[in-house]
């Protein structure tokens, strides 16, 4: 495993990390979740990602039970949660001081830990002043309940507002962003966020490196079934990836899959290695519904050396998604 600094912070995160969206407490059994976490940890993964909204809190309960059972040294791993979607009632959603504090307490209970290493604002909240959220996060840091706070899918403008406010008031600004980043989805990470890396030293923990499994090539011929695309709650994702709104995606992945095979690797590994070729990626969060998937993707760092300049050009030509 390779370890990278989370931006300018002193925290080291494994280049490959493991998350629980769709899977823990929903798509997969707790035994599969446990085996996946064990495998990840044994292979050097030190960051596990979660959120209050994943399976409506069940994902944190499952992960918390596994962490308790494994009894790994708490200093050996980095654990996260995210606040935003806690429920349907007013004050159960968003980034008010009330919800940020209450959601953190609830996540600590569900995960059965004393503190979270990383705590994210899962989306921007237009109805709460950024200053209120920055203050709430700083209170949690001072109380020792969280160590670093960050954002997920905020605009660069809003992140800069948070940094500016924090600097002026001697508070801790966001350490990391959690954006989507994969061969189909690059604009925000590579262009909009460009000023954040250098000027503010922000780290990134990127999500959906395989575009929800698309980039493995498993949808190249026919939908294989028994995947997240079949879930009723993810119909929008299916439309976007393999349905009416998918455009040329499958055709592109077919060419990409041939390239991977020519290079002696798999499309999944090549796509994940491609994210890590970007030095602004601190960690790429993997997802898996089966142990074999993780067995494969945890070896993705092997494919980094295959991404020569020549191959990078070929990849650009296939997807043509490089921001102008
Ligand atoms: N902050 C945010 O807003 C946000 C949003 C999304 C995700 N995340 C985080 O990022 C993590 C990763 O995102 P993601 O799960 O969307 O990542 P992803 O890598 O794009 O998709 C993972 C899914 O692809 C399929 N897959 C993975 N490896 C495979 C392999 N070797 N062969 C065939 N299929 C394979 C599996 O789904 P099937 O078996 O069902 O096909 C797996 O669950 C999440 O768990 C979560 O922690 C954060």
Image (cartoon, rainbow, N blue to C red):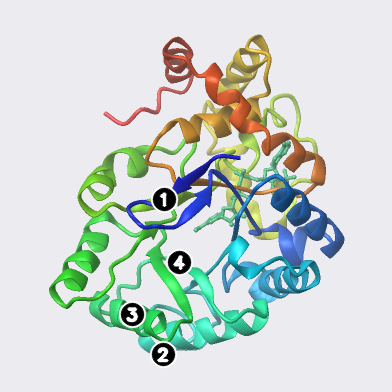
Point out the frontmost of discs 1 and 4: 1
Q: Is residue 261 left or right of residue 157?
A: right
Marking on residue 138: 3
User: Does residue 276 lie above or below 319 as drawn?
Assistant: below
Disc 2 secondary structure class:
helix
Q: Are marks 1 and 4 in contact (CB under 8 Å)?
A: no
**Counting residues from the N terminus, which is met first, the one under dot 2 or under dot 4?**
2
User: Does residue 249 lie above or below 312 as drawn?
Assistant: below
Whether the residue under disc 4 has CB within 8 Å of ligand 1:
yes
Q: Quadrant of the C terminus?
A: top left
Please identify the residue farthest to the left as the structure is shown: 168
Residue topped by disc 4: 122
Residue topped by disc 2: 98
| Residue that appears at 44% across and 38% down | 185
Whether the residue under disc 2 has CB within 8 Å of ligand 1:
no
Q: Are marks 2 and 4 in contact (CB under 8 Å)?
A: no
User: How far from the left and from the top, in percent, is residue 24?
Assistant: 73, 62
| Residue that appears at 67% across and 67% down | 73
Q: Is residue 183 visible?
A: no
**Counting residues from the N terminus, which is met first, the one under dot 4 or under dot 3?**
4
Disc 3 secondary structure class:
helix
Binning the other alpha carbons within 10 Å of mark 4 as few (below 14), some (14 to 19) or many (20 upward) gives many
**Counting residues from the N terminus, which is met first, the one under dot 1 or under dot 4?**
4
User: How far from the left and from the top, in percent, is residue 120?
Assistant: 44, 67
Point out the frontmost of discs 2 and 3: 3
Residue topped by disc 1: 204
Point out the frontmost of discs 1 and 2: 1
Point out the frontmost of discs 4 and 3: 3
User: Does residue 219 lie above or below 258 as drawn?
Assistant: below
Q: Is residue 119 left or right of residue 87?
A: left
Which quarter of the picture shows residue 260? top right
**Counting residues from the N terminus, which is met first, the one under dot 2 or under dot 3?**
2
């Amino acid at each position: 495993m390779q370890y990278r600094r989370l931006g300018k912070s002193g925290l080291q995160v494994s280049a490959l990390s493991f998350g629980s969206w769709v899977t823990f407490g929903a798509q997969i059994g707790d035994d599969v979740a446990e085996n996946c976490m064990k495998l990840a940890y044994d292979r050097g993964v030190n960051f596990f990602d979660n959120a209050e909204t994943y399976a409506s809190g069940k994902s944190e309960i499952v992960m918390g039970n596994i962490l308790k059972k494994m009894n790994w040294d708490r200093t050996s791993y980095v654990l996260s949660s995210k606040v935003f979607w806690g429920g349907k009632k007013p004050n159960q959603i968003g980034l008010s001081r009330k919800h940020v504090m209450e959601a953190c307490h609830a996540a600590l209970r569900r995960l059965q830990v004393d503190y979270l290493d990383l705590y994210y604002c899962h989306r921007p909240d237009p109805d709460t002043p950024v200053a209120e959220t920055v203050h709430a996060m700083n209170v949690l840091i001072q109380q020792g309940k969280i160590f670093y706070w960050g954002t997920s899918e905020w605009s660069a403008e809003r992140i800069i507002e948070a940094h500016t406010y924090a600097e002026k008031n001697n508070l801790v600004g966001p350490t990391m962003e959690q954006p989507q980043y994969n061969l189909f989805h690059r604009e925000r990470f590579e262009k909009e966020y460009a000023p954040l890396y250098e000027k503010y030293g922000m780290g990134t923990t990127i999500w959906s490196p395989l575009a929800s499994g698309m980039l493995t090539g498993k949808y190249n011929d026919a939908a294989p079934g028994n995947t997240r695309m079949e879930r009723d709650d993810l119909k929008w994702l299916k439309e976007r990836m393999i349905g009416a709104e998918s455009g040329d995606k499958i055709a592109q992945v077919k060419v990409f899959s041939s390239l991977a095979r020519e290079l002696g690797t798999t499309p999944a590994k090549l796509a994940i290695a491609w994210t890590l070729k970007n030095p602004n990626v601190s960690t790429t969060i993997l997802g898996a519904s089966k142990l074999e998937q993780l067995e494969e993707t945890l070896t993705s760092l092997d494919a980094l050396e295959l991404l020569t300049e020549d191959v990078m050009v070929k990849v650009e030509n296939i997807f043509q998604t490089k921001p102008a």
